[in-house]
Image: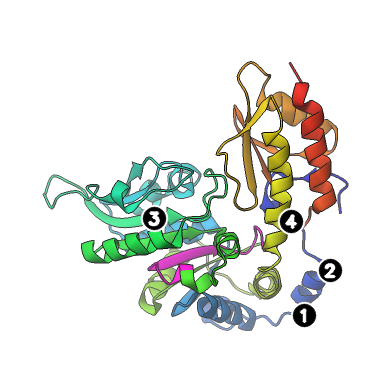
Amino acid sequence: MSSLIDLRSDTVTLPSPEMRRFISEAPVGDDVFGEDPTINRLEEETAALLGHEAAIFMPSGTMSNQIAIKAHTQPGDELLCEENAHIYVWEAGGPAVHSGVTSRTIAGRAGQFTLADLEGKIRPINDHYTRTRLVCLENTHNRGGGSVFPLSEIQRIRAWTREKGLAFHLDGARMWNAAVAGGHHPSEIAKEFDTVSVCFSKGLGAPVGSALVGPKALIGRARRIRKLFGGGLRQGGIVAAGALYALRNNISRLREDHINAQIIANAVRNSPNLMLDPDCVETNLVWFRVKQGKGSAATLAAKLRGQGVLVSNPLPDLLRACTHLNVNRADCEKTAAMLEEHSQFQE
């Protein structure tokens, strides 16, 4: 393992020796023919764990989200999502490019919105208007600081989408974190949605992979769209095996990542030059900024890098530290000490 403490993302994790062994022994077949036993088992176990009829393995979370959008909509439709949602900001304009769908955004608080925020957002039935068809929610919310969407509010929104005839999709790339933080079985969250995308290559530590779950008929459409997108897999069990191992072994340990994130968050809170944004850290993401007149985010990121700690600097004035299974408590305490040491830094 590298001597660097890499907090840029939970996507940087490396497979453990046990995971590598599991991958090397995985039986494989041609998944386009439905004959890869490892992919089939992963899809079955994922669907069962999340309380849905069927699942389809995908190379990435972005592909899962975009295929879900295309399966739910027709060109010219509109989806509703929070203004900093991953599907809107970080997926290269996918809804417009792949599905011909427009996005109407909702101003959220730490990435979250309420039923009251949604009411009144549906377009009237009129030949001049786009048709509102889909509501998308992200849990945990990346730019919302890894915030956990309250299950009670999800349930209220679910009832409203049913009443209005809208589809409801969850970008659940880090839904595993939401379940652990909220003390819920994953199915308690997932069952409220028509479709859910989940990632295996973030907190769970697999090298590659995502899945989309939902009703059998819709997952059948998703399989055809995946082929259209160039995502048909052959002996994909080689990569699905890492995801299967992660699913079976690495969910409950996410609690450790949440505890470690608090160590870093507390150092930021105690610094006179730094501030959390948002100020509540619930899971494994710590977003923070340098206070005005106290230097720049890029300078702090460079200083940390010089001492062996990598954080991401995705926006000019923002930094993010993300805990995961390849960093331990000592790593996070070391990072916290560095942040405290740099609390008086100036450019």
Instruction: Specify the quadrant that holds the N terminus.
Output: bottom right
Please name the residue that numbered disc 4 is placed on. 13
Please name the residue that numbered disc 1 is placed on. 25
Furthest residue to the left? 126
Q: CA distance from mark 1 to mark 3?
A: 38 Å
Depth check, front residue: 343 or 123:
343
Q: CA distance from mark 3 to mark 4?
A: 27 Å
Q: Is residue 226 in the magenta section?
A: no
Q: Residue at x 67, y 18 (%)?
A: 294
Q: CA distance from mark 2 to mark 4?
A: 13 Å
| Mark 3 crowd level (few <14, some 14–19, many ≥20, 10 Å Cα) | many
Q: Residue at x 78, y 27 (%)?
A: 342
Please name the residue that numbered disc 2 is placed on. 17
Residue 141 locus on image (x, y percent): 51, 50
Horizontal side of 153 relative to 122 (left or right) equals right
Q: Residue at x 41, y 67 (%)?
A: 195
Q: Is residue 194 in the magenta section?
A: yes
Relative to 223, say whether 70 is above or below.
Answer: above
Asked if residue 229 can be seen in this view, the reply is: no
Depth check, front residue: 41 or 291:
291
Please state which of the two labelled residues, at mark 3 or mark 2, is closer to the viewer.
3
